[in-house]
Image (tube, rainbow, N blue to C red):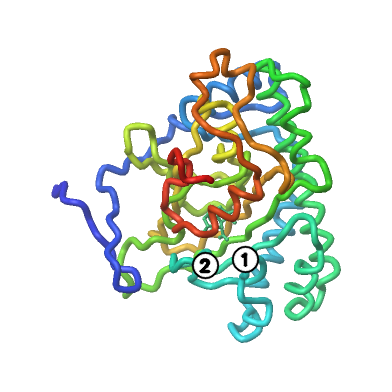
Amino acid sequence: VSLKPKSVTLNNSQVHVNPKCKPSPVLIPVVNLTDPNAKTQIVKACEELGFFKVVNHGVRPEFLTQLEEEAIKFFALPQFHKDKAGPADPFGYGSKRIGPNGDVGWIEYILLNANSDTKTTAVFLQTTPTFREVVVLVEVFMEEMKDMSSKVLDMVAEELKIEPKDKLSKLVKVKESDSCLRMNHYPEKEETRRKEEIGFGEHTDPQLVSVLRSNNTEGLQICLKDGTWVDVPPDHSSFFVIVGDTLQVMTNGRFKSVKHRVLTNTKRSRLSMIYFAGPPLTEKIAPFSCLVPKQEDCLYREFTWSQYKSAAYKTKLGDYRLALGSIN
Ligand code: GA4
């Protein structure tokens, strides 16, 4: 077996795929949200991995199936039709291009702002005969995701003794919260194509937390602290929580925003929906003083979410945005 890094070509650029990638059936922490110990398990997972799986989440499976079916119908439309809902600037329909700085992937997606339903309506109005029903489904889903992320953040605050108790969850519950929803479609591979290709390149999420749900197709990988990439076994009945950069800053690095990526290495298409729970644009982000007893241990200086977001949109997907000094 060769241990030389495999490389795949994507738009003429070489991307290395870690050969040490191994399946990890027991590695991903599983948190039952109704378990009284959930908050301890969540904090442990956020510290060790920045990632965990949520079961007993209370979101009805029939509802998820229905939403997934609508997404499948949308992505099955002719290209010219879908293009009417694009380009993603950053909201709307996008294909292959990710963000404004030249990143690409074997992907098409819809990016929606959780606050303004105008773009959501615009995306589906042109393309979907039953657009009103679809818009309602999407809105209900966003509410469910907001509830789940708030619940998780409340447990984090309780376990870390952050006061007041709703300090974190309030950031995503208020109407000014800058959250968004992404629906990603990774088309199945044709036989002639190379075995592995980058669907969504490695990156961390800038927000507080992200909540992800996919169909039963593999492809998602997370990066461990030692740099090893591991497969996340797909599970359409569960959700996955991803720690974002903002929560890393607020916990003064105690939680790590986890690097993750999607490889399209299967013959089945992958469909995922991710809710990115972000604070209001004007919110000041800095480590909580209760987590930094000595001022000299404070790792990050204060910035607003708006400043961080605009800085993020000037970076490439894989850049390490939290590098000290990158935010002015
Ligand atoms: C990564 C997480 C979310 O998907 C996202 C992405 C955003 C986009 O696709 O518009 C970004 C990326 C993400 C981080 C750096 C910038 C912005 C693309 C990009 C190159 C919606 C987000 O909030 O940040």
Identify the residue at image location x=72%, y=59%.
Answer: 113
Q: Depth check: give the residue in front, 191 or 98.
A: 98
Q: Is mark 2 within 8 Å of ligand 1?
A: yes
The kind of secondary structure element at disc 1 is loop
Q: Quadrant of residue 132?
A: bottom right
Identify the residue at image location x=22%, y=56%.
Answer: 6
Indicate the quadrant of ligand 1 in the picture.
bottom right
Q: In which quarter of the image is residue 174?
A: top right
For label 1, the crowd category at 10 Å Cα-Cα, with few meaning under 14, some 14 to 19 and many 20 or more, is: some
* Image position, residue 101 (x, y; %): 47, 66
Left or right relative to 199: residue 132:
right
Residue 28 image label: none
Going by the picture, which residue comes out furthest to the top? 293
Identify the residue at image location x=59%, y=55%.
Answer: 310
Left or right relative to 209: residue 279:
right
Q: Residue at label 1? A: 90
Residue 241 position (above or below residue 293) = below
- Whichever of callouts 1 and 2 sits on the residue coming sooner in the sequence is 1
Q: Does the residue labelled 1 lie within 8 Å of ligand 1?
A: yes
* Image position, residue 320 (x, y; %): 42, 46
Residue 116 position (above or below residue 226) = below
Going by the picture, which residue comes out furthest to the bottom? 80
* Image position, residue 264 (x, y; %): 42, 60
Q: Depth check: give the residue in front, 3 or 59.
A: 3
The kind of secondary structure element at disc 2 is loop
Residue 158 position (above or below residue 110) = above
Is mark 1 in CB contact (under 8 Å) with mark 2? yes
Q: Residue at label 2? A: 100
| Amino acid carrying mark 1 in the image | Pro
| Amino acid carrying mark 2 in the image | Pro
Q: Distance between the residues labelled 1 and 2?
A: 8 Å
